[in-house]
Image (cartoon, grey):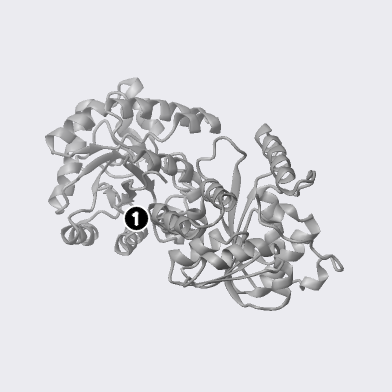
Amino acid sequence: MENPHVQLLPIADDFGLHPDINQGILDCLAEGLLAGTSVAVCGDAAEDEALAPLAARCRQQPELDCGIHLMLCEGRALTGVSSLTDATGRFPEAYPAVVRGLLAGRLRLADVEREWDAQIRRLQAAGISPRHLDGHQHVHLLPGLWPLAVRLARTHGIPRLRTSYQSLGGALRRGAPALIAFQQLALVRYLQTGRQRRTLGVLCSTDLTAAGVLDALVGELRRGRPVELMSHPGRDSEALRQRFPTWGAHWGQEVQELRRLQALVTAAAADPARQAAVRQRYADQPWAVRSFVETRLRLCPIWVVEALLPAQGRIVDLGCGHGHFSLYLALAAAGREVLGADDDPRKIAVAQAVSAEAAVTFVPKRGDELLASSPGPFDAALLLDVLYQLPPAAQERLLGQVHEQLVDGGVLVLKETDRHLGPRYGVAYLEECLVVSLLRRRPAFRYHYRSAADWTALLTRLGFTVDCCLPTPAERLNNRSVILRAVRTPRQVPTSALDPGLRPPGIESAP
């Protein structure tokens, strides 16, 4: 990362809509996963006693970016019955009714401004001074309503308006007309505000995943621009699902994804210094070794891999080559003990020479031979661009051995080129053939790639649970690779039942 010091602002929406959403957000704030939240003061859980814990936290942490979540749907108006509500004073349940009201002229803008002003004042009366303004279901972006939001922000001294713009290209790739129209409108607002801040998480609203935003996040990291992350954490409950049955939201899962993104951002920020420390170790090695290590450090986002591994325990790096990734992991966390294995004694000799005083050991063994000697148990295992060199049956056998040597709950992280029918995969395959043929001075044409779905199915069959599948971020020229994280669950099928009699060929580190 050339400039990893981006200001990432994870903001939770919908505080005030439901007690389980409120508690989930408060839990995330206490854990340090959020930069703030936007408050829906018209929600069913926005009474004074519900807002009091948030107001108290804002007093304790003045840097929290708490804002107003302006509502015209899914709540009860503060100003009573008007053109915005039904006869009982409730807003419609979804934004299409607001759009129809605007187009038909039934929705009076004076009523909107009066209601939104009341909502801002309600939040201020609860002891929370809004630092940003956004809209529930993004209604503040609509033509006619956006100028009202801008005017009210100025009146109340609110410094920032959410534009809700993530990517028009991303919306076009999804092919949903409503999403495309929404991002077109959001792009206009983004330009009107001087390109202040993009909002990641919009294209996967209520289903935030690290995989869905990582590529765009890395782009912002490299540009050094602040970025907002829209999220919807909460405590999963049957009551919450029954209250919002059409959302298809994963409130509890978003909490886990926020933790993962926090780890990834932290790892990205530390990556330049960690890479520099690794390079320093190889400074006295021959030019060919230095060039190889430099190329691998640049092409493989090891910081993503590092963020997916436990910060302490025993880790085995199978096919470690010159040891640069093993060394990186050991230097990144003092609680790790790393064992690197490769069947090329020359590479192991280099790895041993540069690893003095680091908590890492290197052995000149094939991965299957190492695991067969039962050096485990391990807390984690690593296979980076290794398995494609093995036939499918041998891949399965090796992964079965890894499963046996991991503790229950142990982590396996693997990185492989994603197999698909696109031209980039064909280019990547031919590139691998050329590079390996030149390095080994003999033709090499046979590799065994799988798709991410195939890897997931295989790992599941072997007794792993795949809980994360990330595309390697910001890859533009070569084929997209994937990084999978799998957790060991109790094994149901003995290794001996998997392709008996097969012995994997030597495991060599990728060129």
Question: Is residue 417 or residue 229 the one in the foreground?
Answer: 417
Residue 5: horizontal and vertical position, in percent? 33, 48
Q: State the residue at coordinates (32%, 24%).
A: 102
Q: Of all residues shown, which one is farthest toward the top?
A: 104
Residue 208: horizontal and vertical position, in percent? 46, 48
Q: State the residue at coordinates (70%, 72%).
A: 370
Q: State the residue at coordinates (26%, 29%).
A: 193
Residue 500: horizontal and vertical position, in percent? 85, 68
On screen, residue 337 above or below 18: below
Q: Amino acid at mark 1?
A: His
Q: Is residue 11 left or right of residue 417?
A: left
According to the picture, the residue beneath numbered tag 1 turns out to be 18
Helix, strand or loop for disc 1: loop
Residue 379: horizontal and vertical position, in percent? 56, 72
Quick check: can you spot residue 349? yes
Q: State the residue at coordinates (26%, 30%).
A: 83
Question: Is residue 357 or residue 301 the one in the foreground?
Answer: 357
Rendered image quadrant of residue 347: bottom right
